[in-house]
Amino acid sequence: MVSRRKSYSREFKIETVKLVTDGDARVPEIARDMGIHPNTLYNWIQQFSAKPEEAFPGKGYVASDAEVIRQLKRENERLKMEREILKKAMAIFSKDPS
């Protein structure tokens, strides 16, 4: 039987991190109370302190810089493909019909 990984909402993660940062309780105590592993909470704290507004993106949400890069890469691939098609068409139409 396959065990499924438990997922937590962005709001839950932010509130749990704020319990650690705003309160005077220790990470292992809060982790035990919330039913998560202390290492998981340490990871959440690290992610939140790096970029609070982009922390815990969840499914389907991509950070703004990453989204721009992804769109530019996709456009770059499309333009390369169009260029190759135009090169082939140019070669076909520029042949001497004789």
Image (cartoon, grey):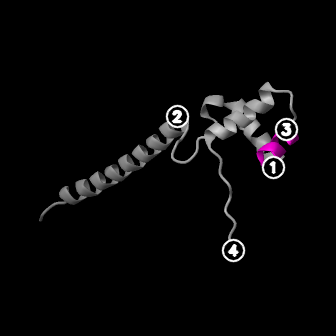
Location of mark 1 (residue): 37
Residue 94 in the figure: left or right of residue 8: left
Disc 3 from disc 1: Cα separation: 10 Å
| Magenta region, residue range | 28-37
Location of mark 2 (residue): 64
Disc 2 from disc 3: Cα separation: 30 Å
Q: Are marks 3 and 1 in contact (CB under 8 Å)?
A: no
* Numbered label attached to residue 80: none
Frontmost of labels 1 and 2 is 1
Q: Can the viewer see residue 66 in this picture? A: yes
Across and down, in percent, residue 13 comes to 68, 39
Disc 4 from disc 3: Cα separation: 32 Å
The amino acid beneath tag 1 is: His
Specify few, some or many for label 1: CA neighbours under 10 Å numbering under 14, 14-19, or 20 or more: few
The amino acid beneath tag 3 is: Val
Q: Quadrant of the C terminus?
A: bottom left
For marks 2 and 3 on the same chain, the one whose residue lies earlier in the sequence: 3
Specify few, some or many for label 4: CA neighbours under 10 Å numbering under 14, 14-19, or 20 or more: few
Residue 43 found in image quarter: top right
For marks 1 and 2 on the same chain, the one whose residue lies earlier in the sequence: 1
Across and down, in percent, residue 38 comes to 83, 45
Location of mark 4 (residue): 1
Location of mark 3 (residue): 27
Secondary structure at numbered mark 2: helix
Secondary structure at numbered mark 3: helix
